[in-house]
Amino acid sequence: MEERQEVGTVVRGRKTPDRAQSAAAGGPLPGPRATPGVIDAGAKLPRTQLLILQAARHRFALDGYTRASLRAIAADAGVDQRMIAHYFGSKQGLFLAAVGLPVHPAEVLREVLAGPRRAARQRIREVLTRVLAEPTIYERMVGVMRAAAGDPAIAPMMRDFLRNEVVAPLTRLLDAPDAALRITLVGSHFLGLVFARFIVAVEPLASAPPADVAALVAPTFERYLFGGVTASAGT
Amino acid sequence: MEERQEVGTVVRGRKTPDRAQSAAAGGPLPGPRATPGVIDAGAKLPRTQLLILQAARHRFALDGYTRASLRAIAADAGVDQRMIAHYFGSKQGLFLAAVGLPVHPAEVLREVLAGPRRAARQRIREVLTRVLAEPTIYERMVGVMRAAAGDPAIAPMMRDFLRNEVVAPLTRLLDAPDAALRITLVGSHFLGLVFARFIVAVEPLASAPPADVAALVAPTFERYLFGGVTASAGT
């Protein structure tokens, strides 16, 4: 399906033989991450983690993100609830691992905000280059978008999760008028890039080097995040 | 699945009772279109059109866009090939109707290009407002993206179609350095807006009035289409 010849990425660690298989087994590895803000994936998971992830996917699909309890997931998996904290840190971490979101949005935004405003575009370029070059984007973001597009149970869960765990905290981080709209505009463009590059794989965007795409898109993200405009004011 | 409460759109004509049902029957009506560049959909189709659309979907999925011949589609449908021209105008028109792309990209870009450069952003705002307010976007663009995300036969067909019938002619229309990359960047952002507004429906973007979204996004599209930057130059 994904027939991209040139992704401009360096695959770290072992190459996952099959994306669907990888997504089924999915989940980040605990331990140091190679790329800040990006969840590493790839190596084999302990059986306990796999059981937790299976139970979590089932519960999240059944109950939605908010109502699904860690207690119920642990019970379904037949493990102690402390194992969830051990392996995934938090409910958000578990959802990211179970559903497959390959980045920590708040960590990425913190990096963009950490520094002088005049250098924000450069920081956006850097972080976006890294994220677009990350093989987990290809393997997991696509899985999330496929699931949201194809499964009636996933889209509302994604919406619930994005509202509570991405848009709300990022809106507080940004601390600007229209912050929530700004965040979702950036998010929509990012989703579109993933869709065009990895799902439809339309050229020349599909094989454009991550650094080039980041250079073109960074001024847009900068304006959406920091620009003086509001929706009603236009321009 | 789409649980959007407020779409900010005015539904013209009869409300389609079921999107999937509508998509299955899909296809534009011949005759005058209410919104320039946007294909109208909704009313009942003559049986001949339905037969042609069914045959076309089958052939396009089987052979891909380029190899699927109008002769074979007409034969499969059991109709004279001239009926395809009569109802759909061209192979592109038939594909748009069969797969469901709800806009004529070249017509939209021509409108953006037809006028002084200094007013281009305003024209982009106007055309984008219209396209985002169009109920066919909700009903059909989402169908295309769902199909491309979910069906291994659709994504390569979409890629083939986009390359030959959207990116190539729009690139010639734009007549600029990096024109193809510029076109695909605009397209990726548009796909992302549709995904975020209509598939995941993440707020506040999902229910932001089309005119507000257009005002925020128009400067981005203007820069992607006309900006002085190239990918390698950055900025």
Image: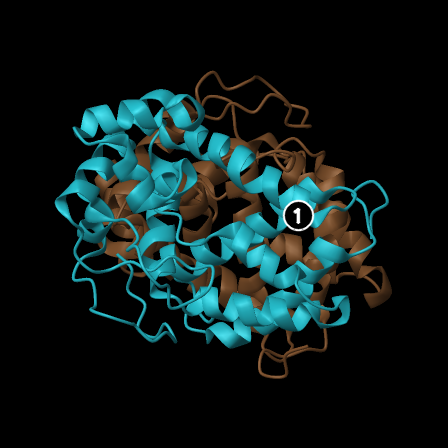
Chain colours: A cyan, B brown
**For the residue marked with disc 1, what is the amino acid?**
Leu
Which x, y percent locates residue A164? 54, 33
Q: Nearer the viewer, residue A229 or A174?
A: A174
The C terminus of chain B, quarter of image: bottom right
> How many tags in the picture?
1
**A140 displayed left or right of B111:** left
Picture quadrant of residue A34: bottom left
Question: Along the horizontal axis of the image, is B231 left or right of B100?
Answer: right
Instruction: Using the image, determine if residue A115 lies above or below residue A139.
Output: below
Which element carries disc 1, helix, strand or loop?
helix
The residue positioned 16% from the left and 28% from the top of the image is A78
Residue B28 position in % (x across, y down):
50, 35
Q: Residue at x 68, y 47 (%)?
A: A182
- Can you identify the residue that label 1 sits on? A173
Residue B39 visible in the snapshot:
no
The residue that appears at 72% across and 46% down in the rendered structure is B214
Q: Is residue A102 visible?
A: yes
Q: Quadrant of the N terminus of chain B?
A: top left
Q: Chain of mark 1?
A: A
